[in-house]
Amino acid sequence: MKLLEEFKESLAKPARGRLARPITLTTKEESYITNYARSLPTKMSRSNRCQRINHAKRFLVFVRDKPRDKQTIDGYLDQFKKDTTKIFVFGVVKEMFRTNGLEKQWPYRKGETPQTRQSDVYSPALDPELIKMMIQNRNKLTDSEACFLALSTIYGLRRIEMSTITSEDVKLEDNAIFIHTAKGGRERWHKIPEQIKPYLTKHNFDTRFNGGELTVMFWEILKKNNLKSALSNKRIGWHAIRRTVVTLLIRSGLDPFLVKDFLRWKGPPTQGLDMPAHYYATSWVGLEGIKPIITGTEADIEIFKKHPFLEYWNTGEIVENGDVSKEDKRMARYWVNLGHWETDFEEESEQTEKRKRVRQELEDLATGVSGDIFPSLVYKTEDLDEAIRIREKAKSIIRAEGFSDELVITRQPECPACGYLGRFSDQYCPRCGTKLTPQEEVD
């Protein structure tokens, strides 16, 4: 009864913008709307429900004195400029026909749904490097912000999915979390990797956030990473992270069925997966009744092996097959500065040729370039003995052409708590906030 009262209240609530004009319905039309409203998912947000109901009401007014044929419905859809809006409204009208027992009057055949032009599609995915930076700066976030950032970057959760999580859905002792999916997706248990477990533990899941509050939280996270002003006009949200997760998982070469299952899509990403998805079990039936399957599934384990962001949630431990058993064994990285050998300025021809020869040989030796204004050739290694050998070899190349051979080996800043290797400009570990050991030259 409470739900029905909410629906009736939403019928009377005026819409905004295009739908703001008052709408008066006949008794028959009101019954159509009531039946349609009852069919909407109980977990659908109030604003989403109102939007759909108002579209349904406007359609009924439009066709009141017209035949409910394809030409009339197409005429109603033509008032919307974007193809994506046409498809959305088309779905609302079709569902209203179905919920009122009017399927036989539906004038469209299967496959005649309006199509979306590629130019009308806006599906932004957030740059992976920005996501990595947000994760590494998680010490700047509140416990709730870090928790939802972890859920978004690991599971690609939709905003509405994050808003429905309660303490009953999080089984930390079983390393499992249940996701109530949106858009008709398949609800399922997920395995919680050890890397994000501390951040889920700190958040109180009895504190619920609605969609609007989660959007504010997303932009607050961007603000704390100095990204808000640069991205303020890009129309992005949590879904931009989901698209990035999907894209990188597919590019990693994972089975599309695993990716589809992990992202909780009900429909198949490729043809031929309808039946496996339909028959995929979510619970066991036994002598003790029905038990949900919360083992985390093999799919999650396979996904985590190639997940693009999981390693950035590491806090000094590495995970093997779901068990935290070893300390992070990353060694300090040593940089051998091989010098700046550009020849873009005037000097004697013989010297220029010598510099070119040195640069050519050192380029074969180097592993990269450091610096923008005065780029220097560098060699990076985790082995100090190897760094010393490379330095001596480079010195011999430089001395052979008569140049000074003062080359240094620099040890990269390192976190004493978790072993993370920081940038030379970093003072604190972006993973755990511990002060980094300063860079130092090695003799």
Image: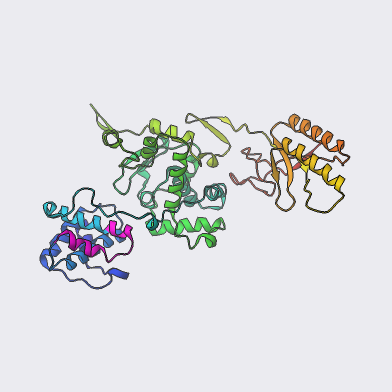
Would residue 86 be counted in the magenta stretch?
A: yes
Q: Quadrant of the C terminus?
A: top right
- Give percent across and percent down for residue 69: 15, 60
Kindly report the secondary structure that dominates the magenta region of the rendered protein.
helix
Quadrant location of residue 46? bottom left
In this image, 150 relative to 56: left or right? right
Residue 96, compared with residue 410, is above or below; it is below
Q: Residue at x 86, y 35 (%)?
A: 400
**Residue closer to the observer: 108 or 243:** 108
Q: Quadrant of the N terminus?
A: bottom left
In this image, 333 relative to 218: left or right? right
Residue 266, compared with residue 30, is above or below; it is above
In this image, 249 relative to 260: left or right? right
Q: Residue furthest top?
A: 287
Q: Residue furthest front?
A: 349
Q: Residue furthest right?
A: 402
For the record, the magenta segment spans: 68-88
Would residue 157 be counted in the magenta stretch?
A: no
**Residue closer to the observer: 353 or 333:** 353
- Give percent across and percent down for residue 302: 44, 32
Residue 388, compared with residue 46, is above or below; it is above
- Give percent across and percent down for residue 45: 31, 57
Quadrant location of residue 90? bottom left
**Residue 431 shows in the view:** yes
**Residue closer to the observer: 414 or 325:** 414
